[in-house]
Structures are given as structure tokens and as C-alpha cells.
Amino acid sequence: MKQKINVRLIGIAILAVFATLISITLIFYSLFEKQVRKDLRIHAKILKEAKIFTKEENSLQDLRMDTEELRITWIDEDGTVLYDNDTDAKDMENHSDRPEIAAAYRTGSGESVRRSDTMNRNTFYCALRLEDGTVLRVSTETRSLFNVFFTVVPMIALILTVIILLCILCAHFLTRQLLQPIEDMVENMEDMETLPVYKELVPFVNRIRMQHENILMAAKVRQDFTANVSHELKTPLTAISGYAELIENHMIDEGEETRIAQGIRRNADRLVRLINDIIRLSELDNSEDEIRYESLDLCELAENAIEFLKVFANRRGVSLLFEGERCLIRANREMMGELIDNLCQNAIRYNNEGGKVTVKVTHEKKAPVLIVSDNGIGIPKEQQERVFERFYRVDKSRSKETGGTGLGLAIVKHIVELHGASITLNSEIGKGTTIRVEF
């Protein structure tokens, strides 16, 4: 990055120097041309006012004008050259076709420039018509633009070299000065109080910091999840191992076999449910590109799920009620079944004997809504935000007694997010809980 910025700054500086040089050369040469034209007009007017050039006999015999830089030519009305201070007039051709002479005949004055590419010189002409109809012309030669330019090339090269070296030094300094705040910011990326020097970098820095925080948070969640999994698996395995040890050492009384077998089966079932839920969460974490969506009737799905759960509800002494209307959604059938099943099982599991669970499917503001409510134990306000975390239980002892893994609502939340839906929870201790899923 430093090298790129450095090279571009040097390139811009060199281009700017050359552009400035060419522009100044053109401007000064233009001013020089204007000055030459102005000087020629002044010389012509002075000679005209002096009335040296007249057709009187012998008027030119004593005329001597030895000027190296100024050429003077006097032309008759028919274009015949009467006098020239540089060449014998008798040897000169007719000048009536010269642009400046023709213009002077017509309007009283004329100017022109004739450029010689071979000699790299320009000749400027200025002609004035005299009172007797003759024309007085003065001219001078100057160097062409290229001639002037190449004459000063050594000096220009020296100046350019000095300027370019200065530009290179400035480019290195500016590059370091530009990038230093960015390098300092990178070194202090974790320091939230360190703000970028350049306001244009604020969104970028905020995004990087947010991603950094998310990575750290994800790492912590993964670490906590691993620790929780280890703990959750250890509990039933310890129980099963303990029961096996009792059997192995013949430490159980007659008649206790059934109770021990039930304990082993209960912990094994819990272990299987736990493993299944962990596997399912892992599948959901990596299933975004594999989800098959189809048009489903949410009411029909909920009704079928409740039929399967009636036995479980009756065993808990909880009545299960359903009311709904046809609501079409685009979703994955298996995931929707899991979502409804987990919500209903939680409502039944954390209810009191004789309690009630109501499942409702309806439209609100033209959007399909699934509502699962119970009149069970409720959730404390300070814990409501955490119930969707993996392995988080409001009542740990009750959860283990009822066979809960602590992953049901985590699975529900994941399914809701994969379907672009939203989930809200409203609960009060001793009065129950209501969970709404809006599609």
C-alpha cells in the first residue's frame, strides 16, 4: 500500500511539473509574440511620421539604415519594391501578393507571420499605407517556439531534476504521514476509545471491530457450548456408570432391579435426546444452503403436531387446546414440525398439573402468526432474554425431572431465524408464558 501511494504521488507530481512547464512556455511565448507585434507597429508608425519615404527625386540616394534586427521595405502602389535595407530593391520581385501588403492597400495596415520549419524561425511583418499610396513594411525575425524551448533544455532539465527529487522526498514524507494514523489504529484496534483520524475510515473501523467482537463472542459461545455439552453428557453417563457398578458388585437388594433398570433407561433416554438435539443444532448451523422450502398450511401442521402430543400432555395432567385458521407460509416442513413440537413440549413440561396449553394459528395484519400460551410456572423477567440460549434452564431441577435438554428453545430460535420470522416471549411468574412466532 505504501509503495502504491508513493508511486502515484510521484507520478502526479511529475505530471504536474511537466504540465506546468508546457503551460508556462506557451503563455510566455504568446506574450513574447504580442510584444514583437507591438514593437513592429511602433517602429512602423515612427518611420511613417518621420516622412522619410517620399517619391521626390533623389529622396532615397542618401538614405542609409543599417539595422540588424529590423528590416525595412518600401513598396510602390503597384507592388514594386522601391527600397529595402537588406537587399537590392532591383533584384526583388513584386510584393503586391504579400498578405500584409494587400491588407495595407485595402485598410491602411496589415500584419502577418511567416513560419520557417526548416530554419526554426518566425518572421513578423507589419505594413502601413503612406499618404501617397505607397506602403512601408517593417519586419523582424525571432526564434520559433521549439527553437526557444530546445535552447533552454539544459536549464529546464536541471530544474526538473531538482523539482522531481523534491517531489520524491515529499511523496515519501506524505505517504508516511498519511499511513501512520492507520497503522496506529490497527495496533489499537481492540481499544474502542481510539477513534480513526480520518472520518472516512469510521464505518470501516466500526465494521472490523464489530466482526472482531462477533468472532470473540462466537469463540466464547463455542467454548461455553463445549463445556455445557461435556457437563450435560457427564451427568447421565455418571448415573448409568453408578447403576452398572451397583449391579456389577451385587450391591442391590432383591426387588430393586426394576428401579435400577428404570434409572438406567431414564438416563439413557436423556442421553439420546441430548445427543439428538446437539446433532440437530449442528445440522441447523450448516443447513442454510440445503433448506427446501415449500408452501405449507401452518394450521394443518400445528393440528397434526398437537395430535401426537396429546398423550404426553395427558400423562402430565395438562389439557391441550387448539384453535386456528388456514395460514399459508413458505417454509421447510420438517423444521416447522420441530418448531411447533418444541414450543408445545416446553409449555407442557413447565406447566402445573391441571394446567392448560393453548395453540393458536391466525392472521394479524395479514401476516401468519403462531401463538403458544400456557398458564404454568412462568419465567422471571430478568431471565426471559436468556431462555433461547443453549443449555439455559430457568428451573434446572424441574428440567431434568421432566426430561428437558435445555436445547429446545435454542433450536426454535435457530429455525425462526432461518425462515426470516420473528419470535417474542411474554411471561409472568405464576401466571404463565406466551410465545409468538410471526412469519
Image: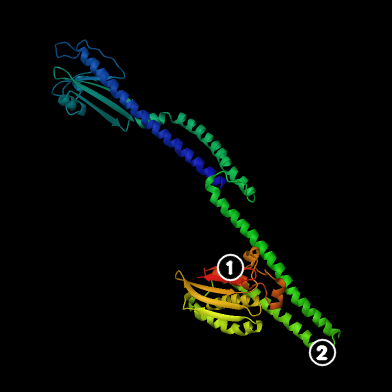
**Left or right position of 410 against 141:** right
Residue in the image at 25% along x and 12% along y:
64
Disc 1 crowd, CA 10 A, few/some/many (<14, 14-19, 20+): some
Quarter-of-image position of residue 125: top left
Residue 288 visible in the snapshot: no
Q: Judge whether residue 29 can be spotted in this image.
A: yes
Q: Which residue is mark 2?
A: 255
Q: Disc 1 residue type? A: Leu
Using the image as rendered, state which of residue 321 and residue 73 is in the foreground.
Answer: 321
* Residue density around tag 2, few if under 14, some if 14–19, many if 20 or more, within 10 Å: few
Seen from the viewer's position, the closer of residues 131 and 9 is 9
Point out the tag, 1 or 2, that comes first from the N-terminus: 2
Secondary structure of the residue carrying tag 2 is loop
Q: In the figure, residue 277 lies in which quadrant?
A: bottom right
Task: For marks 1 and 2, give the CA distance.
Answer: 47 Å
Taking the image as shown, residue 169 lies to the left or right of residue 121, namely right
Q: Secondary structure at mark 1?
A: strand
Q: Amino acid at mark 2?
A: Gly
The disc at residue 210 is none
Q: Position of residue 58 (x, y in %)?
A: 16, 10
Q: Height in image: 207 above or below 108?
A: below
- Quarter of the rendering containing residue 430: bottom right
- Residue 146 on image: x %, y %: 37, 32
Residue at mark 1: 425
